[in-house]
Image (cartoon, helix red, strand yellow):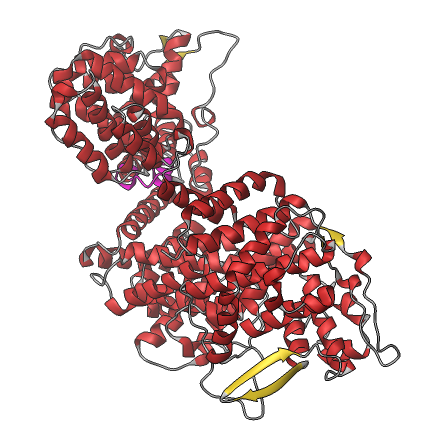
Amino acid sequence: MASESVAWFEFLLNPTLLESHLNQENPEPSAIGLIIQFIYNSVKRTDSGNNEVETVDTNSQETSTKKEALSILALKAAAHLNWDLDTFEQKLPQHMQDSLLVALLHKTLGELSNPVSHVNLDTGPLLPSQLFSVALYHRYALRAIVRAKLPQKPVKVSSVPIPGQQDPTQESREVQDSILNVLERGAEVSVRILEQLLGAGEVRAPVMATFNVYSHQNAVVTHAWQRCISVADEQFKCQIHYDLGTFHFLQEKYEDAYSHFSEALKLMPEVGSHPDYCRVSETKLKGYYNSCAALCGRSTPVEQRSLYDRFMYAMSNNFQGLIEVLSEDNLVFKLPSYVRRNLELDLQSTPDKLPRGLLQEVQSLNALRCVLEGELWQSTYPIALTESGKPAIQLLVQTIGSMMSQLNNEQKERIRMFLMTLCLEGKIPDSLVPAVATHPSVRVLFTKAELLDMWPNYEDARSSTSKMSLDEPVTVDADDINDIIWDLIHSYKPEVLKDAVMHYKNASPPRPDMPKQEIPELNVKWDVPIPINNTLMKLPPCPQRDLVYVYIAKAVELLQAKSFGSALELLEEASKHGSQLQGREMPRLCKMLMWMVLMTKIQHCLHQLPCVDGSVMEELTNEARQCLSAHNNRDGIVPWTSITKWCVMLLLNAGEWNTLLSGTSLPSHLPLLSLVKPLATTAHALREKHTNKSVWFALWDVVVEILSTSLQHKRSSCGQTTAVERQHDSGVMNRSSFLDFLGNLVEPSCLSILISLLGHVLNILNEEPVYEIHIDHLAMWPPPAYSISASKECVKDTLTWLINHALKLYPTGTYTNPSLCTSWHLSAADLAYINDIYS
């Protein structure tokens, strides 16, 4: 960062200062800022009727040495930016872009510098530096025409002028239209010249060292054109092809556009990842190319098409490749559900004209798509599966097995329940269960006991041993003890787990030299909360204690998968068996298990909000208050951090802000409270319509510090360990914890406050009115002059995630104020505009 800002005229006094200034990390003023100042102070203003026209005066008889020097300084700053038209278009007004590029033509072409004279220009004899300046100007001309025709977000201009000051970036509509009229009249000339330049030889771009600045010692200056650097042929041609393609696309000359886009696409691999003189977005290029290909009837290889295009191709080619497309879609969910349902209905209407087995495969794949996506599948599917017989059932199991490695735990559980439901249809289990048992990747979803429940005729080796006495050791061979371990690790049924624990404890080891592991050691991924684990291990060892351990560990796994009902069932079993244990620590264990049950209910409630009954919320808030009050008890049994966190989150989301601020004693070491308390204070003040900027600014400071901490933590990978240690000691929540907090926040007022705050932070970081995000509660936050060190991308990603989270919870005004939803949709639209997602 530059130590202090440098005035523009200092570079006029000392031209050698410019290069060293711009090579700083974050120079102030920036290269664009200097270009604006140099051009603004080198213009000649003339009145022509009511129109004010600004041009760089290049006539040496009328232009002073100072103005010439400023013009050259502007060109040097533009060279520092590698003549990036994208940057010029975003940050320079039209008349300054035009002035800058005409000045470059003047320096390189001399008498041919007037673009109007390019009607008969022959690019063959031009020097490499002249080729570059001609290409740059005519690319700018076509891009300006395209940009003027496309919808643009209007620039927000202050309605209150500052006395005695004029914004150099403001231009009248008349000036802009006058420039565009000239460019449009010469559009055909620009196209012809750029197409000529595609066959040019070496092209060299001016750099900062190319230009020598006028001074009072030397009124005549010769520029060092030999210092220009060579532009890669691939970059030069790819950029011209792309700009010509976009212009032809706007003119609806799709064949010409397709030709240029296809050539640009061929050159993209050779351009490289960080080219200096090519700014072509590969995503946009492919979008243009695909659009032109469709409009021109050009065929794209089937394997390179989108999933939907491949689906339509299969439909029009006797269903060739249809099954592969549907199978792929079952993993990515790209095809709309109604398209697949309509396909099935169409096939059912003409079954005699279809390839054999196609309808059944489509029905099975559609049913699996619904299952994996968590949607309702057709109730008539079991009947259709039964009618198709054993081959269709085996094909279903094989299809499931082929995708098992790509499914997450939640989807695997859905598949398991789907297959168990199918077994309720009378004749299906006879074929389904044997097929499942012989397919390893599907077999792991079920215990042997579950397979017996699905089909009583299924042979199970453990059915005979289960009747033996649990009080006497039994000899179990290696295969059977592995089955018991498999049940302990993979099952979540209390009865199966109890049976497996008792059999494992009573079974003799298969080999005398191979002792059995203790049950807690069977799975290193089991994660019992440390306070409960420490208390449990102080109790006398017994099978009952191991059973409680397993129940808790499995409940934690289910909590992580958001299967709250099954987790509660296991925790209640753990509480029942825990109360039967002997030892002094038993009351402590029971109390901790009671808190863990409460935490599970809270997580379930927050997961279901806003669709939660008021009585359930009231009951849970009362239990949460009682749990937090345990911090004042003297018996030494206090809730651990996770329990406290979830109780606090419940009270925050229930609107019990007074309780958090004054009614409950909370541990001071909890980092979450540094954010929750100012947020609760702000939400309470907003609800009571109190104006208290000190409260609002306190929340602002906390969130900005979190965002700034995230930035510094990212830099720590380069060796800045002291900064990380200092922030860790300060108790500031990191970005990961902040995102977890936002993910559990469902209260509309709190969501609205944080969306407003993050939006204001992003507006400050953007520094450009055209990219301003719509927010509520603007008066609550500090003015835009406030300095922030957070990463703009980090803030933008966090705000985007939070708005999507809020709109997912409240897509309409059913459960909250409709004006809030409207505001969030407006903010989402502004973010989409910034990210170039115009649709």
**Image check: 455 left or right of 672?**
left
Against 416, residue 243 (above or below) is below
Q: How many marks?
A: 0
User: Outermost residue, right direction?
Assistant: 217
**Image check: 694 left or right of 330?**
right
Q: Nearer the viewer, residue 477 or 299?
A: 299
**Image check: 321 left or right of 512?**
left
Name the quarter where the N terminus is drawn: bottom right
Residue 762 appears in the rendering: yes
User: Outermost residue, front direction?
Assistant: 120
**Residue 361 location, x and y as percent?**
23, 22
Residue 581 appears in the rendering: no
**Image check: 539 left or right of 329?**
right
**Residue 72 location, x and y as percent?**
74, 71
Residue 370 forms part of the magenta stretch: no
Residue pictured at 21% horizontal, 39% vertical: 338
**Residue 33 location, x and y as percent?**
64, 73
The magenta-colored residue range is 555-567
Q: Main secondary structure of the magenta part?
A: helix
Residue 565 forms part of the magenta stretch: yes
